[in-house]
Image (spheres, rainbow, N blue to C red):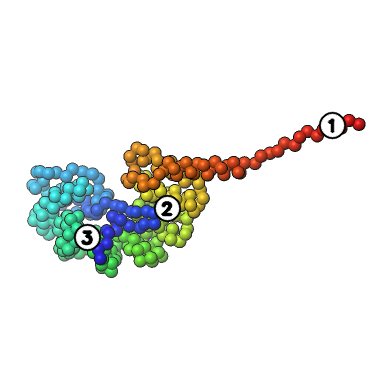
Amino acid sequence: MRRKLIPMACLTFVINACASPQNRKASADVGAATPLYSEKVGAVLVEKVRAGSCPKTSWESVDWRKLVSYANACVKNGDWAQVEKMGNHLAIVSSDTPWGAYYLSLSAANQKNFPRAIWMLELALKKAPREGILHYQMGRLLWETGDEAGALKSLKTASEENADLTEAHSLMGTLAFHRQDFSSAEKYFQKALERDSGHWLSLMGMASVRVKENNWKEAENFLQKCVRANPLSSRVRVALAQIQEQHLKKLAEALEVYKDLKSLSSENKLDEILRFNVDEKINNLEQTLSQAQKVNQVTVRQPADEKKVSK
């Protein structure tokens, strides 16, 4: 049975984690004219690539390294027709590198053609068997097609070849969480956070682990970090408010989170629309806090003056 790709939908208790598709970025190094993979174009994931131009014309004659950066921009912009064209071109003009097959794999995965996507990645790995991100992408695809054992093997190889590949550690944590191996999940998420303390998916993973342990205070701490890492995520803010309200009884703090949600929603800044009546939630909390305040007020009773008795 095919599974949802982990960075696209995962780690839910009241959170649904989302991330961008993965990709690479070309370095500024020009190197020799002949495209040998030993020149090693620098590789990073597409969510770490800055927005750029995805040219429609006049790109066929540029150096293959520059074309890699163009292809990254096209992936970032979701222009898959251009990604396909550039992948085919790179497969011809830089046949000793893995990038043509890699972009064709990304394009096939976007079309849900997973057999072709895996085949293209296998071709890329033959050209660059020690490239960590290729193994990472293979792990994602194998998970998508239901091969969890194969996915874990590819992800372990990715982390071994590139110890700084945060996403590989995080995805292994997600797989462990899915197996309800929360101890291993925590280990992998922590390993990812050691490399990127603001890695959103790993922070949510740690929050999810703490929820499973009923450790609401630490879950709150991780969710607060998630909010700082991604202030426009509605689900993370809702999760934080629910934990504060229902488990920590921090009604005033929860109220402020709901008010922030209302403000961001009214400005259309949230990544998803709110699926509950936030005004009703705010009103109920305000009434509860008001009643509690009245109950807790201490009324100091002044004794009446004693009546003077005449002798």
- 3 vs 2, front mark: 2
Considering every residue shown, the one lying at the far bottom of the view is 149
Measured as percent of width and height from the top left, residue 20 is found at: 26, 51
- In screen coordinates, is 94 left or right of 138? left
Measured as percent of width and height from the top left, residue 78 is found at: 20, 48
Q: Which residue is mark 2?
A: 222
In the depicted structure, whether residue 192 falls above or below residue 66: below
Q: Which residue is mark 3?
A: 134
10 Å crowding of disc 1: few (<14), some (14-19), many (20+): few
Write down the quadrant of residue 141 in the picture: bottom left
Please indicate, yes or no, whether residue 121 appears anywhere in the rendered image: no
Q: Amino acid at mark 2?
A: Phe
Q: Which residue is mark 1?
A: 308
Do the numbered discs 3 and 2 sit on residues whose CB atoms are within 8 Å? no
Between 34 and 184, the one lying in front of the other is: 184
Between 187 and 259, the one lying in front of the other is: 259
Q: Earlier in the sequence, mark 1 or mark 3?
A: 3
Q: Earlier in the sequence, mark 2 or mark 1?
A: 2
- 2 vs 1, front mark: 1
Image point (53%, 43%), residue name: 289
10 Å crowding of disc 2: few (<14), some (14-19), many (20+): many
Between 294 and 135, the one lying in front of the other is: 294
In the depicted structure, whether residue 224 falls above or below residue 11: above
